[in-house]
Image: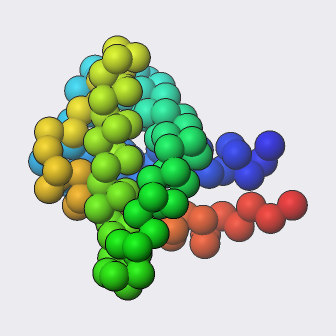
Amino acid sequence: MKHFVVKTLSNAAAIWVAAWIVSGIDLTADGWQHKTVTVISVALVFGVVNWLIKPVVKLFSLPLFVLTLGLITFVINALMLLLTSWASGHLHLDFNVTGFWPALLGSLIISLVSWGLHLAFDDED
């Protein structure tokens, strides 16, 4: 349970940083309490998308992983962020990614920030 909470909170912080840095990622909630709830909710949606859909996409794109030496991972992460934005819109969350390039840059920032936070807050049981 501790692993799930740490991972969700680090993803929420990473999404917040990406929304702060990248101009095409919008977090339009008013007030810091509403933004906090929205970011945690988006992090939960992001976690579900990465848990359910990302392994299937990676399996079907295995030849591309070999061909691009793993660089297709950045594109897949951007697509997962776009899918999170789409799902967040249907859940009436104030989170939107406006295109592929902001999603690509945002997924890179989210990966780096969440990696750094996982290193800082080691969550091994």
Q: Is residue 76 left or right of residue 118?
A: left
Percent of width and height locating residue 61? 41, 63
Percent of width and height locating residue 124? 80, 65
| Residue ID at (41%, 81%) | 66
In the picture, residue 44 is in which quadrant? top right
Colour mapping used in the image: rainbow
In the picture, residue 67 is in which quadrant? bottom left
Please tell me which residue lies in front, 60 or 69.
60
Q: Is residue 4 left or right of residue 43?
A: right
Q: Is residue 122 above or below residue 4?
A: below
Count of picture labels: 0
- Residue 109 seen in the figure: no
Percent of width and height locating residue 12? 47, 44
Percent of width and height locating residue 93? 36, 21
Please tell me which residue lies in front, 93 or 55.
55
| Residue ID at (29%, 62%) | 75
In the picture, residue 119 is in which quadrant? bottom right
Viewport quadrant of the N terminus: top right
Q: Is residue 11 left or right of residue 100?
A: right
